[in-house]
Amino acid sequence: MGKEPSKDDSYAEFEEASKNKGNERFVLRLYVSGMTARSMRAIDNLKKICEESLQGSYDLEVIDISQHPEAVSKEEVIATPTLIKDLPKPLRRIIGDLSDTERILVALNLTAKKKK
């Protein structure tokens, strides 16, 4: 039988996870349908969020479902634009043009930068 984890073990794991949180790499996929104004707005908004909040700690793939229709069923995309955050877990899906920065930061489990 294994050893029952103590509160100290759980706290140590939490502390370790907290230290590594700043080093996490985000894996993001944005599904768009053609290069429409809404698609371009979502791409621009997401790039801005990534540059300001993730500062190079991300991989971003933009997938045009008009060019890759198989992606719709594979990822169960029901509307576009759809952002899928694969890593870090948990998986998140965000639908829309990503213009509500605060909502996107919360959904990605990031904190908004304080305005000076």
Image: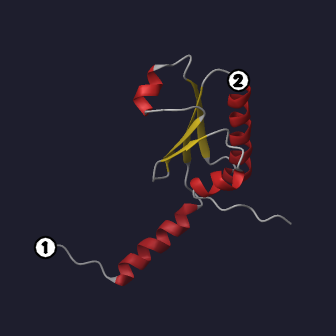
Q: Residue 48 is drawn in which quadrant?
A: top right
Give whichever of 49, 103 is nearer the camera. Answer: 103
Mark 2 or 1: the one toward you:
2
How far across and down, in percent of the image, does residue 61 sit? Answer: 58, 33
Quadrant holding the C terminus? bottom right
Q: How many marks do you count on the picture?
A: 2
The residue to which callout 1 is attached is: 1
In the image, residue 24 sits, relative to residue 11, either above or below, namely above
Residue lying at 70% horizontally and 61% vertically, measured from the top left = 112
The amino acid marked with disc number 2 is: Thr
Residue sitting at x 49%, y 52%: 88
Residue 11 image offset from top left, x and y in percent: 43, 78
44 relative to 8, above or below: above
- Classify mark 1: helix, strand or loop: loop
In the image, 91: left or right of 28? left
Place of residue 106 in the rendered image (x, y in percent of width and height, measured from the top left): 61, 58
Residue at 48%, 66% (x, y): give it. Answer: 17
Q: Which residue is mark 2?
A: 36
Residues at circles 2 and 1 in contact by the CB criterion of under 8 Å: no
> Front-most of 77 and 109?
77
Q: CA distance from mark 2 to mark 1?
A: 59 Å
Q: Is 50 left or right of 27, judged from the image as shown?
A: right
Neighbours of disc 2 within 10 Å: few (<14), some (14-19), many (20+): few
Q: Is the N terminus in the top left, top right, bottom left or bottom right quadrant?
A: bottom left
Which residue is farthest right? 116
Image: 61 above or below 92: above
Q: Secondary structure at mark 2?
A: loop
Q: Of callouts 2 and 1, which one flags the residue occurring earlier in the amino acid sequence?
A: 1
